[in-house]
């Protein structure tokens, strides 16, 4: 059977009081933190420009930082407008309103939003990527909390414990359906693309600092320090991209296999949206096997906890790296059987 067509049990939000769900609460915390983070990051290019100006090195890097300042300011303003204004309403709806399961279909999508037909209304939903649109098209349902008197609502996609900003929209004609893709492979390809972009940007900044270091200014030592810093960022981003490609290859070694699993421990910080999971899975011969999942997303954690199942591509081989996740969903991570 095609991996994308497997019918599997997945996480769904509770009937009410969704803020008590640990995965949902974690994502709300990151929404709040990201609003502050975007505002703080505006100061980074400003700081670089000021330091370069004081040290007499306003050249290539200063121009790059000014461009970065404009881009970051636009992103911060957009995020505050979309998420910052919606977040207080979302927290109120999640704490006070019951969920509704509604028949849904994708009507249209743009780079910044997707229009969904949900029951007898239309919703403009943010952060619905192509993988999630594939899930909606296959399941034909979403979970909606709200809308309130102003038309604001919260949307959940099956298996995805991330509250999505939504607002009632005008009726929209349905566009042609997107070509079917494997959401897990699509997700990894997108993550690898982001990593390659970060590597390219950091490399460009490192090259700019190296160029500035060749000029007769007072900032030579500082320029070399920044060049080494961004070279390190580029190497880390490159390693991340290669890791995503390796994980994508692991998805091709076999079919998804289901293993009963129990959470043994998790390690992580509330400041980052990933945790390290240690699980005990039951093999077909009755033995118990320990599995360590590095950088598991809240979505993977929630699905394992709720369903008591870990889906693995291919057989469980001790010491070997395997792909784990949720079939047919943009949820995938690397795991190693002990």
Image (cartoon, rainbow, N blue to C red):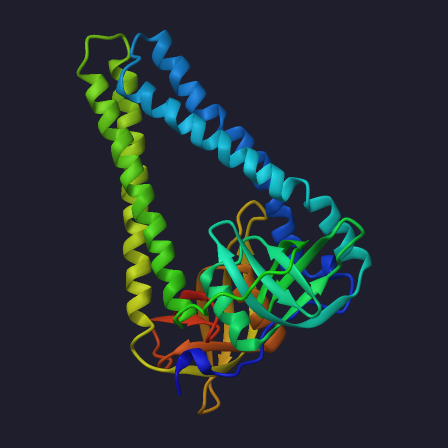
Choose top left, top right, bottom left or bottom right for residue 68.
Answer: top left
Relative to 25, does residue 62 appear above or below in the rendering?
Answer: above
Q: Position of residue 155 (x, y in %)?
A: 65, 60
Relative to 165, does residue 34 appear above or below in the rendering?
Answer: above
Q: Position of residue 51 (x, y in %)?
A: 38, 14
Image side of residue 61 versus residue 145, left or right: left
Q: Position of residue 313 (x, y in %)?
A: 38, 77
Q: Quadrant of the C terminus?
A: bottom left
Choose top left, top right, bottom left or bottom right for residue 170.
Answer: bottom right
Image side of residue 10 versus residue 232, left or right: right
Q: What residue lies at 76% left-to-right and 69% top-to-bottom?
A: 15
Answer yes or no: is residue 320 visible.
Answer: no
The residue positioned farthest toward the bottom in the image shown: 285
Q: What residue lies at 27% left-to-right and 8% top-to-bottom?
A: 218
Relative to 41, does residue 141 appear above or below in the rendering?
Answer: below
Q: What residue lies at 49% left-to-right and 65% top-to-bottom?
A: 175
Q: Quadrant of the N terminus?
A: bottom left
Answer yes or no: is residue 215 visible.
Answer: yes
Q: Nearer the viewer, residue 266 or 138?
A: 138
Q: Position of residue 324 (x, y in %)?
A: 43, 71
Count of numbered circles on the image: 0
Choose top left, top right, bottom left or bottom right for residue 44.
Answer: top left
Q: Nearer the viewer, residue 268 or 169?
A: 169
């Amino acid at each position: 059977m095609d991996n994308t067509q497997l019918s599997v049990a997945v996480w769904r939000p509770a009937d009410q009081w969704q803020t008590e769900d640990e995965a949902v609460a974690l994502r709300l915390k990151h929404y709040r933190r990201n609003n502050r983070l975007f505002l703080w990051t505006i100061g980074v290019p400003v700081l670089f420009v000021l330091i370069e100006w004081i040290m007499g090195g306003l050249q290539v890097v200063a121009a790059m930082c000014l461009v970065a300042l404009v881009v970051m300011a636009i992103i911060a303003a957009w995020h505050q407008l979309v998420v910052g204004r919606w977040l207080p309403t979302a927290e109120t709806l999640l704490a006070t309103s019951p969920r509704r399961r509604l028949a849904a279909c994708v009507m249209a999508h743009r780079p910044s939003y997707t229009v969904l037909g949900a029951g007898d209304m239309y919703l403009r939903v943010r952060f619905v990527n192509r993988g999630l649109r594939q899930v909606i098209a296959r399941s034909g349902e979403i979970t909606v909390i709200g809308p309130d008197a102003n038309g604001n609502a919260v949307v959940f996609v099956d298996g995805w414990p991330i509250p999505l900003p939504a607002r009632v929209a005008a009726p929209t004609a349905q566009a042609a359906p997107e070509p079917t893709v494997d959401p897990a492979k699509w997700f990894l390809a997108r993550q690898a693309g982001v990593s390659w972009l970060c590597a390219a940007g950091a490399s460009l900044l490192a090259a700019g600092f190296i160029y500035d270091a060749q000029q007769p200014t007072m900032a030579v030592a500082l320029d070399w320090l920044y060049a080494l810093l961004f070279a390190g960022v580029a190497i880390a981003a490159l390693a991340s991209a290669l890791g995503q490609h390796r994980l994508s290859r692991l998805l091709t070694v076999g079919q998804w296999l289901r293993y009963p699993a129990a959470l043994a421990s998790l390690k992580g910080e509330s400041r980052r949206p990933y945790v390290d999971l240690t699980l005990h899975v039951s093999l077909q011969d009755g033995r118990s096997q320990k599995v360590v999942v590095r950088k598991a997303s809240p979505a993977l954690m929630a699905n394992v906890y709720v369903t008591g199942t870990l889906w693995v591509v291919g057989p469980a081989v001790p010491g070997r790296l395997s792909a784990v996740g949720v079939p047919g969903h943009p949820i995938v991570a690397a795991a190693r059987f002990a």
